[in-house]
Amino acid sequence: MRRGSASAIIFASTRPTNDRRATPTAGNGVAGRKPALPWRALSETHWTYCYERERDRDLRVVAVCHLSGPNGPDLSAAMVREGWALADRQYATDHVAAEDDARKARAGLWRGEFAAPWDWRQRNR
């Protein structure tokens, strides 16, 4: 996530980047859709409150972000629940149930085919 000159990794979720876009399946309308767009739509209509949870091994900030203040909805959970991000099981299991629900409902990216970020990285090393 980037705001001006500040950037952070959102805790417990990950999403395919632009070079790992979804592909269409039976005209689902997902192809080429950038998963960042739903986050932008949410963050443009709500102010975003983030706090540093930890630093990763490269000392990047890993943040937990909420919409509309510290007690608002968790942005990461919302993205996973809507199918625009995946639970990052390598680091936490916080959003696994939300991802399972999104997959079953064929929400967001789940309407088509896409490479999970960890699979894409493994194939493109």
Image (cartoon, rainbow, N blue to C red):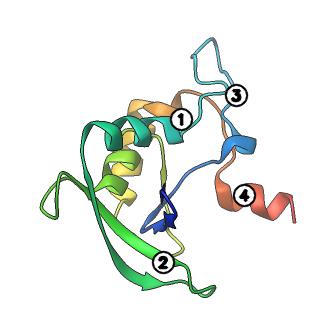
Judged left or right of residue 50, residue 92 is right
Judge by depth and name the residue closer to the eye, 51 or 105. Answer: 51
Q: Position of residue 116 (x, y in %)?
A: 64, 51
Q: Residue at x 48, y 57 (%)?
A: 4
For disc 1, the marked residue is 109
Judged left or right of residue 32, residue 107 is left
Q: Which of marks 2 and 3 is nearer the N terminus?
A: 3
Q: Which of marks 4 and 3 is nearer the N terminus?
A: 3
Q: Which of marks 4 and 2 is nearer the N terminus?
A: 2
- Assess whether mark 1 and mark 3 are in contact (beta carbons under 8 angstroms): no
Instruction: Name the amino acid, label 3.
Output: Thr
Using a 10 Å C-alpha cutoff, classify the residue at mark 2 as few (fewer than 14 neighbours), some (14 to 19) or many (20 or more): some
Instruction: Name the amino acid, label 2.
Output: Val
Instruction: Name the amino acid, label 4.
Output: Asp
Q: How many labels does the image show?
A: 4
Secondary element at image label 2: strand
For disc 2, the marked residue is 61
Q: How far is disc 4 from disc 1 in space, using C-alphas?
A: 15 Å
Secondary element at image label 3: loop
Determine whether 6 is above or below 25 in the image: below
For disc 4, the marked residue is 119
Q: Earlier in the sequence, mark 2 or mark 1?
A: 2
Q: Where is residue 34 in the image (x, y as percent from the top left)?
A: 59, 35
